[in-house]
Image (tube, helix red, strand yellow):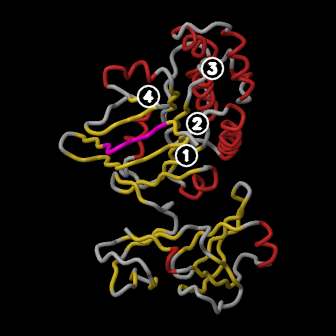
Amino acid sequence: MTNIYQLNKLQFHYADKLALSLNQVNIQTGKITALIGANGSGKSTLLSLLAFLESPGQGEVIFNGEQVNKGELTYYRRRVGFLAQKPFMLRGTVYDNINLALKIQGKKQRSEKIHRALKQLDIKHCATQQAKQLSGGELQKAALARILVLEPEVLLLDEPFSYLDQHSAQALEGFLQTYTQETGQSLVFSTHDRLQGFALADNILALAEGKQVLTPLINLFHGEVIDHVFHSGSMRIILTEVSTKARHASINPQDIVLSTEALVSSMRNHFQGRVVLISDEMDRVRVNVDSGVIFQVLITYQALDELNIKLGDKLWVNFKSNAVVVF
């Protein structure tokens, strides 16, 4: 197993403020990695570092086995593809924009590459359209096509779903699911929809206040720890790991067991609630249960059939103490 990125003791500051502090982070080659976290957690800063638009004030970045030096950022920048949250297109047609990107890098067979990328993203009809007149979804795809023709070693996407309608978002989800399989290349994307990232990605990199936390930040609750119990405003979660300074608790949506009756088991946390959402989440099912707080749970279709539940049904949420991450 190889890594496209290795980040060692990395720190980045904006003026005097520490924005990112990562001790050791590895991003695997040929996999999809989702960056998740609240606004201001460091996702965009990390993407800028991965795209070599910025360099860390401290620490080491290794890209595809090569140690990156500050003086060579342009060289490494050419090897990655970065799609900004609001992509910028130049005047001219979609074809003109993509062709210019290829021309700047001295690529051959430009017309063939352009048509292949447009077909891959289902926007061949946009080739002769003025880039400035595209819809939000078409603009996102056109900017992505401009990157794909350059065949980057890693594709970086900053909040790619933010401005898309449902149809465009579903099409992009489909692309992300097949990209690494078809190309063997790596893909990193940030998202504010943590469960979407969890469902789409092979690996999760979760950030909180510029630091990595070993939890997908789903089922995230705020409170305090008192005597091995995490207290939030409306519930008590029994813990095994105790940090009296912790102010957050999170439970992986796959570590939660749903049941129609109270379970008698080694699991020490049980909450009864009402089913408020059942939805498809790639190849799994998202079930939201309201027990005073909303628990988000991912289960298989088989488990859904066995539970035989519908909206409004009462349901128990069960999880072990060691399934809770506090920080």
Instruction: Identify the mark at residue 186; answer none if there is no mark.
Output: 2
Camera-side residue of 36 and 193: 36
Q: Position of residue 41 (x, y in %)?
A: 37, 52
Q: Amino acid at mark 4?
A: Glu
Q: Residue 120: name its quadrant.
A: top right
Dot 2 and dot 1 residues touching (CB under 8 Å): yes
Task: Pick whichever of labels 2 and 3 is earlier in the sequence.
Answer: 3
Which residue lies under the disc numbered 3? Answer: 149
Which mark is first along the chain, 1 or 2? 1
Check if mark 2's residue and mark 4's residue have beta carbons within 8 Å.
Answer: no
Residue 7 drawn in magenta: yes
| Residue tagged 4 | 66
Q: Identify the residue shown where x is 51% and y is 9%.
A: 104
Mark 3 residue type: Val
Q: Give coordinates of residue 288: x percent, y percent.
A: 62, 71
Question: Disc 3 versus disc 1: distance between alpha carbons?
Answer: 21 Å
Q: Secondary structure at mark 3?
A: loop
Question: Viewer-proximal residue, 291 or 157?
Answer: 157
Residue displayed at 61% across by 26% down: 134
Where does the magenta region start and end? 5-10
- Residue 185 horizontal/vertical position (percent): 62, 33
Task: State the quadrant of the N terminus.
Answer: top right
Which residue corresponds to mark 1? 33
Which is the main secondary structure of the residues drawn in magenta?
strand
Q: Is residue 78 above or below residue 318?
A: above
- Which one is in front in this view, the residue at disc 3 or the one at disc 1? 1
The span from disc 3 to disc 4 (Cα, nearest Å) is 24 Å
Whichever of callouts 2 and 4 sits on the residue coming sooner in the sequence is 4
Looking at the image, residue 177 lies above or below residue 233: above
Query: Is residue 213 rendered magenta in the image?
Result: no
Q: Are marks 2 and 3 in contact (CB under 8 Å)?
A: no
